[in-house]
Image (cartoon, rainbow, N blue to C red):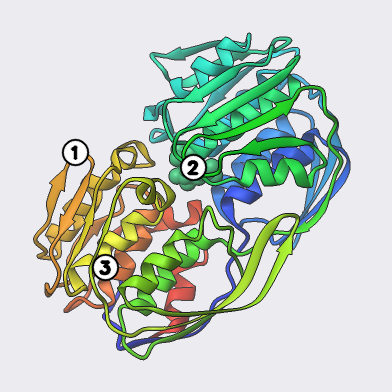
Amino acid sequence: MVRPARNVRGSVRLPGDKSISHRYAMLAGIAEGPSRLENYSTGADCASTLACMRLLGVAWEQKDGTIEVQGRGPSLTAPADALDCGNSGSTMRMVSGIVAGQKFSSEMIGDESLSRRPMERVITPLSAMGAQIASQAGKPPLQITGAALKAIDYTMPVASAQVKSCLLFAGLFADGETRIVESMRTRDHGEVALRAFGATLESKGGGQGNEIRIRGGQRLRGIEARIPGDLSSAAFFLCAAALFRGSQLTLPSLLMNPTRARLLDILMQIGLRITVTQLDEIHGELVGTLQVEGAGLKGITIAGADSAALIDEIPVLAAIAPYTEQGIEVRDARELRVKESDRIAAVAANLRLMGAQVEEREDGLKIPGGQILHGAELDSFDDHRIAMAFAVAALRAEGETLIRGADSAAISYPAFFRTLEEVTEP
Ligand code: S3P
């Protein structure tokens, strides 16, 4: 149950970034020597990755927020059971790149939501590299028979950082040099993490036509790292702060990777004041402390490369759109329909229940500004980002909002509701 708030104030220290946590856990497992991962994501998704790595023979221990991993080197052991990826598309898509290069077969399964999500985007290129993969018409469960992989030259038809990382990880096990081209730049945590663990990668292009090359047979070595705060989780607090003139929030040690930080530009354009201090770089990832202050809320259009760069943050931006002056239009975001839920339909349904006018389109949404919303009974659609996005929208609604299935927030951020309560003034 979320009640309207008058303001947002305080300091929020975010658990480690989910994208980085997944990749570090996987690479630590196939590296040589121990790794120490501080501030590992507290979300259930990253626990799914760790559970899969344990089934593949990687020993690890959790001490407070730190994971200590005993790297096994590139050869893992055949899992005694199916690799359960839970709700996590990242786990299934990226671990598949690692097991494709092993000398055994693995079965990868997931929950109901994950079992509906498209996997042909990894099946096609991994098969081209020599792995044998059976699926349910391109969906999980996947049966992956590993092989001595051969390098490929692959242009990705979908903008997906999960697919890019999957293929770079598979490329480590392949004979020759794998070349991956993405027409739309996606988050580069896979590249940055591989370098942190000692691999050499060539990349060029940057914007459109970004190209990455990796030679097979490189050995990785363990690292000691502190994982920066999750920027996509911070998005909910940043949007909450944007709703109130004079709000003040501090977010220490937050991930500032330029391929993830487009949200900050967008929020500044719509009226949030943001100051960044204590910029630092840890294992190639940029970190900083953010000070934000709410000051008006203008509208914006999100399209093209921005839609890919903001893919996880669009639900919460759309959820605050009715409160902006000119509204928010989202285009070129068809991928949102195949996330943990159909996020375009979920956002439209919940906004309408709150009394908002919304135009739902195949590839996005058009939400007029200047609207007054009322509290309502909403559904999370068992999607963590929908649950959290509407908790934020509820802060400015008239009356109380009940979010069914709100515990799905634990997929990426178990402490979300407690922390939201701490920084909102009733
Ligand atoms: C992620 C990439 C994105 C994003 C997901 C995490 C990653 O998915 O939505 O939450 O860590 O690489 P896609 O690669 O499917 O776009």
Mark positioned earlier in the residue sequence (1 or 2) = 2
Residue visible at 56% across and 61% down? 230
Q: Residue at x 56, y 33 (%)?
A: 164
Quadrant position of the N terminus in the picture: bottom left
> Whole-Å distance between the Cαs marked 1 and 3?
20 Å
Between marks 3 and 2 in the image, the one whose residue lies nearer the viewer: 2
Q: Point out which mark residue 46 bears.
A: none
- The local secondary structure at tag 3 comes to helix
Residue 387 against residue 110 in the figure, above or below: below
Residue appearing at x 54%, y 29% in the figure? 181
Seen in the picture, residue 198 relative to 40 is either above or below; the reply is above
Q: Which residue is mark 1?
A: 362
Hey, what amino acid is under mark 2?
A: Arg
Q: Amino acid under label 1?
A: Glu
Residue denoted by label 2: 185
Q: Residues within 10 Å of mark 1 (few under 14, many from 20)?
A: few
Q: Quadrant of residue 28?
A: top right
In the rendered image, the residue lying farthest to the front is: 205
> The disc labelled 3 sits on which kind of residue?
Ile
Residue 337 percent location from the top left of the image:
29, 39
Residue at image mark 3: 320
Q: Position of residue 166 (x, y in %)?
A: 60, 30
Mark 2 lies on a secondary structure that is loop
- Give 253 or 299, whichever is nearer the viewer: 299
Cα gap from disc 1 to disc 2, whole angstroms: 22 Å
Q: Earlier in the sequence, mark 1 or mark 3?
A: 3
